[in-house]
Image (tube, grey):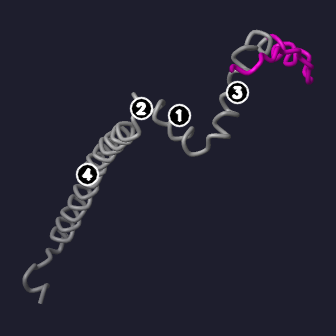
Amino acid sequence: MLKNSFPIGSDGSWTLALQAYGQGIREEGLASSRRLEGVFQQAIGDVRKERQALASFIVGGQDRWESGMAMMRDARPVQWNSFMWEDRLVQDNQPKIRDCRIAATQAGQPKPCVITINPDER
């Protein structure tokens, strides 16, 4: 039935035309898919930013960093206090730690270092 509706010339011109048409449809479909993917990626990024801002607002922080700190402090206070003490130790001894790290790197082996531990604040 199809043969009678679309006679194929001896040179195969209808076959070539249909193949070209099909190729065009496939290419346009792929291009449309890529455009939609870009639109969806942008929308997902926008929603992610909005969710992060909303979470910061709910927690009460000025930004995501402060909100994260508040959530960690509230979720695990003992670990948070340990983290803060360790951070203070490193910050108080930053120059000594840097110099010791450079010396260990130059020597290519571990190097003992002397640091100062300040008393806890009361």
- Of circles 4 and 2, the one toward us is 2
Q: Which residues are magenta?
A: 99-122
Quadrant (top left, top right, bottom left, bottom right) of the C terminus: top right
Which amino acid is tagged 1?
A: Met
- Circle 1 residues within 10 Å: few <14, some 14–19, many ≥20: few
Mark 3 to mark 2: distance in Å?
22 Å
Assess whether residue 17 is covered by the magenta stretch: no
- Amino acid found under the numbered disc labelled 2: Gly
Give residue 36's mark: 4
If you read the primary sequence from the N terminus, does the residue marked by circle 1 or circle 2 appear first?
2
- The residue nearer to you, when weighing 105 against 68, is 68
Q: Is residue 98 above or below residue 81?
A: above
Q: Which residue is mark 1?
A: 69
Q: Nearer the viewer, residue 57 or 119?
A: 119
Q: Secondary structure at mark 3?
A: helix
Q: Residue at x 36, y 41 (%)?
A: 58
In the rendering, at what x and y percent does residue 51 appear? Answer: 34, 44
Locate residue 56: give its quadrant: top left
Q: Answer yes or no: do the residues labelled 3 and 1 have beta carbons within 8 Å?
A: no
Assess disc 2: are there few (<14), some (14-19) or many (≥20) residues with their C-alpha within 10 Å of its C-alpha: some
Question: On the image, numbered disc 2 is attached to which residue?
Answer: 61
Which amino acid lies under the numbered mark 3 shown in the image of this protein? Trp
> Upstream in the sequence, badge 3 or badge 2?
2
Q: Is residue 35 above or below residue 6?
A: above
Q: Secondary structure at mark 4?
A: helix
Q: Disc 3 marks which residue?
A: 85
Report x, y in % for residue 81: 66, 33
Q: Residue at x 84, y 18 (%)?
A: 105
Q: Earlier in the sequence, mark 4 or mark 2?
A: 4
Q: Residue at x 67, y 40 (%)?
A: 78
Residue 104 screen position, x and y as percent: 87, 18
